[in-house]
Amino acid sequence: MSRLEFFIDQSRCIGCQACVQACGECDTHRGTSMIHLEYVHRPTGVQTAPMVCMHCEDPTCAKVCPADAIKKDDNGVVLSAAKPRCVGCSNCVLGCPFGVPKMQVSIDLMMKCDMCYDRTSVGKKPMCATVCPSEALYFGERETLERKRREKPVNEFKFGQQTVRTKVNMMTSSEKDSIPIDVAELMAHETVQGETLWEAREGAPDAASFAVWDD
Amino acid sequence: MSELHKSGSPCGPLFAELCHRYVLMALKNLRAVIAGSFLGGIVLLGIVIGSLGGIHFDAELTFYAIGSILAASAIGYRFALWAERPPTRRYLSRGYQFLREGRQRPKKTIKRSLSIGTEKFVGQGFIRRRSIFRWIMHLCLSGGCTLAFAVTFPLVFGWVHFQPFLGDATRYEVRVLGVAVDSFSVHSSKAWLMFNLLNIAGVIVVVGVVMALYRRLTDPGERATQSFSEDFVPLLLIMAVATTGLALTVSYKWFGGDAHGILAIIHLICVLGLLFYIPFGKLFHMFQRICSFCVGWYKQEGAAGIQAHCARCSQPFASRMHIDDLKVVLDQLGFDYRYGTDAEAGHYQEICPACRRRLIALNQGQAIGR
């Protein structure tokens, strides 16, 4: 496990949903898929983005938990909520800057991606990374990845004033050392036919192209 | 420290070091030490007053009483440490606030407290919905242990004792805090039930432990994440207490009291082990569950109140109270998720989880140039 790392490049996602299906096969949360596959803005684009737990070095979810239910193991994997402890308060769901934990309301239990603990703890790949055809979700050695990609893996995110470092890496431009999460630029800024649109970026698949609204 | 190190036997430095550490820890967690001492004191006082100044105290059970006082202190200490954490403090104080405000509508407050209490503590419906097997297992463990504690603590503390009638040794009188509340014939089924309540509890607990061990040994998900100290030790401790307790009955019923003395000592050691494990291990969740009562109430109040709407997609995603509370808790914990300039400062807490995921995708795409 030590040499294998998780790398995500959301922009490579083709929205095939294989990860969503595979995730539900994981033994630690059998039958319930934990991965998020988000349509970035469905009315105006086809871009999808997978989101797994990033396994923060100083997990906000664990810190805001009132019941000490979220623990990090020696390898830095942030585990799903401990079943006897979780009180189902949703603090973690609302606290996580990546929007990862899922609240199972009926059973009073938060569940989230635990990097397929049953698999990665014995040297196997997580379910999602084994099935991802476009390698948007990649689990392997850093050197192998670096040979294959021109993008650079980083594990630092800036949410406004807060810097968050994670175990899972995300691919970004080779000139960058971190991924700043710009909110203001990407806010809803205009309304067309009652639908809010976000800042258009020319040529981007998620761009709010006005063309789709013109009959 | 160096002065202390020079003194005495080879154990000296180690002992001095331990004392030093203990004192530092106690000073750092002074409030928790006070809470622990307070709870221990309450139990001691309960024993002294409840046994009417020791008249009805059963000297055979002295070690159990001492263990209970020490365990109560440890539980008070751990509880205070836990309750001082910002998110916990927030929920506990909110729970207290709801109860206090609810005094104006006592009927509604009592009804809601009972419904939350029944669901979370008695019926444990949230476990039933996880799995029926685990529900039965947990009811056996929690119900069996509660029954056993309910029988033993009043006996150990001298609150309840049995006394034969003068002139009629076949009838027993039940005295609670020195007051006769009931009487029964030793040949009645009631007597059988009274004298075997602890054995019944023991059997229920053993059933629960066996079910739990079966699950821990066969469930692939649990096998991947469980640890010996966190998940097996409590089960083995409970099992040891139940089986040695039942062995005492077996010994005096069918083997003429063979090995009863040594069994009693082993049982005592197991019980003390369990009592001291409670505050520091998995079993502490029985006290942490108090928070679920506050959370249940919090959710109902939140749903009835103003909702927070996502700053990006304008959809409601949580209660306004929850988002505002979380901002305070994040500040207390040293996180700062504010963004933008002072003039147009925003808080990441105002964005719904789905929009947070989308924002990350948008930013990643932007950074990578796709």
Image: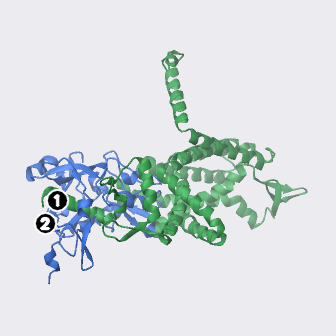
- Residue A170: quadrant of the picture: bottom left
Q: Give percent across and percent down for residue A39.
A: 23, 70
At label 1, counting other C-alpha atoms closer than 10 Å, the crowd grade (few under 14, some 14-19, many 20 or more) is some
Q: Three-letter amino acid code at disc 1?
A: Gln
Instruction: Tell me which chain appears green.
Output: B
Chain A, which colour? Answer: blue
In the orientation shown, which residue stands out farthest toward the front?
B343
Instruction: Give the camera-side residue of B370 and B215.
Output: B370
* Frontmost residue, A40 versus A78: A40
Tell me which corner region of the image, top left, top right, bottom left or bottom right, holds residue B324. bottom left
How many labels were placed on the picture? Answer: 2
Q: Outermost residue toward the bottom?
A: A215
Callout 1: SS: helix
Position of residue A185 in the picture relative to residue B248 (left or right) = left
Label 2: element kind: loop
Q: What residue type is labelled 2?
A: Ala
Image mark 2: chain? A
Label 2 close to label 1 by CB (< 8 Å):
yes
Query: In terms of depth relative to the viewer, which is nearer, A188 or A88?
Result: A188
Q: Relative to residue B361, is residue B262 drawn left or right?
A: right
Farthest residue toward the right? B167
Q: Residue B285 carries which label?
A: none
Chain hosting mark 1 = B
Would residue B289 be seen by someone viewing this image from the given angle? no
The image position of residue B231, as x and y in percent, is 45, 52
Name the quarter where the C terminus of chain B is drawn: bottom left
Which residue sits at x=47%, y=65%?
B134
Residue B61 vertical placement versus A26 (above, below): above
Q: Disc 2 and disc 1: Cα gap in Å?
A: 9 Å
User: Which label belongs to residue B366?
Assistant: 1
Q: Mark 2 points at which residue?
A: A204
State the residue at coordinates (52%, 35%). B25
